Image: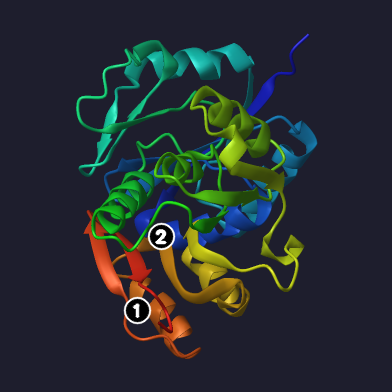
Amino acid sequence: MQTTLLKIEFTIDEKLAEEADEFLASKAAHGWEETPLEGGVKITLYLEDHALGRDIAKEFHARFPDAGVTCTEEEPEDWAMAWKDFFNPVTCGDTFKIFPPWLENGDDNGVTHIVIEPKMAFGTGHHPTTSLCLATIGSLSESGVIEPGRTFLDLGTGSGILGIGLAKLGLKGVCLDNDPLAIPCAVENAVANNVADSLELAVGTIESLGKDVRFDLVVANILSGPLIEMAPDILAHLAPGGSLILSGILADKQSDAVASAYARLGLSAPHRYVEGEWICLVWERIGA
C-alpha cells in the first residue's frame, strides 16, 4: 500500500518570496512548485512525512501569518499523472532537450536528449534555473571550457538532470543531495539515460566529501544563501584550473551578493548568463 502525500499550499507576497524560499530550503530538502500570481507567489510542497509536513506548515504560519497555509492528503498517483497533462519537451540552449519517457522517440534532431521521469525531486527542466544551467553547460562545452574525461561535482542534484547532462558530454562525477527521496529518482533517471556508470549518486552534503577530493567542475543549482555560506567549502573542492557554475540565483536581488562572497575568497568577476529573472554565475578555469 502506497503512502499518501501531504500537500501543503500557501500564498506569499512577492516581497517575502525570497525569505519564504530560504525558510523552505532549511526545512524541506527537495523542491517545491512556485506559481506566480498577481502581487505574489503560490507555493505547493509535497511530503511523505506527514508529521514533518504539519510541523513545517505550523512554523510557516507562525512566520508568515497571512500566507493562508493549507494541508491536504493526496494519493501519490495524482502527482505522477498530473505531469502528463502539461509536461512538454524542454529545449535548453543549443545542446540539450529534455523529454519525459512517454514522449521520447529516439530522434536526436541534432541535440542531446535527457529523459527525466517527473517525480517529486527538483529538476524537470521546466524551472528556468534548470534550463539555464543546461544551456550554460552546453555553451561551455561548445567553447571547450567543459571537456570530456573531466570530473565534476553536482551539489543539490535533485532528479540528477545536470549530472546526466554532463555525463552525456563525456564527464564523470559525483551527484549529492541532502534529500533522501531525491537520490532514488536520480538513480532511476541515470539508468534510463544509460549514464549510471559515469555517476556516483549519494545522499549527502559537501561536508560528506573527503578533504582532498577535487573536481574539474563544480555545479550547484540551489539557493543564494547556501551558495554564499558554502563558498569556502565549494572552492576547497575545486581543482586548480577548474570551473564553477552557480545558479538558483535571482539576477536583480541576489547575484551581486553571491559574486561578492566568492570575490572575497579571491575570485574575479564571473560571467553572467541570464534567463528571465534568474542568473547563472560562471567562473572559467580558476587559477589557470
Which comes sooner in the sequence, label 2 or label 1?
2
Q: Residue at x 48, y 27 (%)?
A: 193
* Amino acid type assigned to the residue bearing label 1 in the image: Asp
Near mark 1 (Cα within 10 A), the count class, few <14, some 14-19 or many ≥20, is: some
* Amino acid type assigned to the residue bearing label 2 in the image: Ser
What residue is disc 2 on?
247
Image-based side of 32 in relation to 136, left or right: right
Q: Is residue 154 visible?
A: yes
Q: Residue at x 61, y 71 (%)?
A: 237
Q: Quadrant of the C terminus?
A: bottom left
- Measure the C-alpha gap from mark 2 to mark 1: 13 Å
Query: Residue 175: percent from the left, percent from the top?
Result: 60, 49
Q: Residue at x 48, y 59 (%)?
A: 219
* Most distant residue in the front direction: 149
Q: CB atoms at circles 2 and 1 under 8 Å apart?
A: no
What residue is disc 1 on?
256
